[in-house]
Image (tube, rainbow, N blue to C red):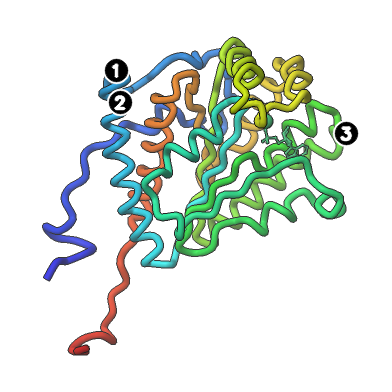
Amino acid sequence: MDQPNSGPARKAPKSLASVATWRVDPGKAAELTKIDAGSTPEAPGDRATTEKASAELMIRLAALQNRLRAEEQRSVLLVLQAMDAGGKDGTVKSVFNGVNPMGMQVSSFNVPNDDELAHDFLWRIHQRTPARGFIGIFNRSHYEDVLAVRVRKLASEKVWRPRYGLINHFERSLSEAGTSVVKVMLHISADEQAQRLQERIDDPTKRWKFRLGDLEDRKLWPDYQRAYEDALTETSTEHAPWFVVPANRKWYRNWAVLTILVDTLERIDPKFPERPDLAGVRV
Ligand code: AMP
Ligand code: MG
């Protein structure tokens, strides 16, 4: 019989690109201006070659997720942050295309409602962290509470500054409970955002994604970049690292996020449960 957790049935996986390419090293200052949003570091080749590599990674991701779900001991939380039109929705759609939806939970965080505002900022977040066996995806997250809140001056520095420490504690407790926290910032350029926002206005099938408030946020671009740099610097930790992915090119972005996810799951190495209780059982 096949050995599901070892042996010849599990082929040796192809080597992965190093996630160090995108990782914000804990304790080091993140500098977004030094990362070219249009670059494609470590890409396996041109667009076609990279898309082929992504297709293979998607199969690998699906198999890993299946084992994660079967094992039901650990979980993965992917936090996605980006400026408007940075490609968060597109990333979720493309990267998880081959993954069984039964093992996934996607949460989008919008402007907090009254009930959410009546609680601490992590209250609504904690309710959506992935249960054992699941991959949770945060489309925006608790990081809005040190990004949008700071830049739009929705709270004073006395309120948002201590949140870095609170976030680190929170993510540490998730990690201690078996959740691998992986945080990805999709890094686009201001020019790329202008193009994408204009397309949202011009294309009737994309208008639903556009809010006039996006233009207000765009005016605050430098403030957002600074707030992102501080958040990345303050909260990239060994147990919950940040990765900055150049995201002007969608095919590259998808491949990079897939690489980071497959790397995370292969480190977890979830196993199909042994079932000694089934020894000799016949139907
Ligand atoms: P979108 O993700 O484009 O649909 O938009 C969601 C909006 O909600 C963005 O403008 C976010 O900045 C905003 N948002 C999300 N979380 C918060 C928060 N905690 N405080 C303020 N604004 C937030
Ligand atoms: Mg939006």
Which residue in the protein does label 1 denote?
46
Identified at 31% across, 31% down, the residue is 17
Residue 50 image label? 2
Mark earlier in primary sequence (2, 3): 2
Establish if 99 lies above or below 24.
below
Q: Name the residue at 42% across, 39% down.
A: 95
The one nearer the camera, 159 or 100, is 100
Q: CA distance from mark 2 to mark 3?
A: 44 Å
Q: Is residue 184 above or below residue 60?
A: above
71 relative to 152, above or below: below
Q: Is mark 1 within 8 Å of ligand 2?
A: no
The residue singled out by tag 3 in the image is 156
Q: Mark 3 vs mark 1: which is more N-terminal?
A: 1
Asked if 77 appears above or below 281 in the picture, the reply is above
Q: Split into 4 quadrants, where in the image is the C terminus? A: bottom left
In the image, residue 131 lies at what x, y percent?
54, 63
Residue mark closest to the camera, 3 vs 1: 1
Of all residues, the one furthest to the front in this rendering is: 204
Q: Secondary structure at mark 3?
A: loop
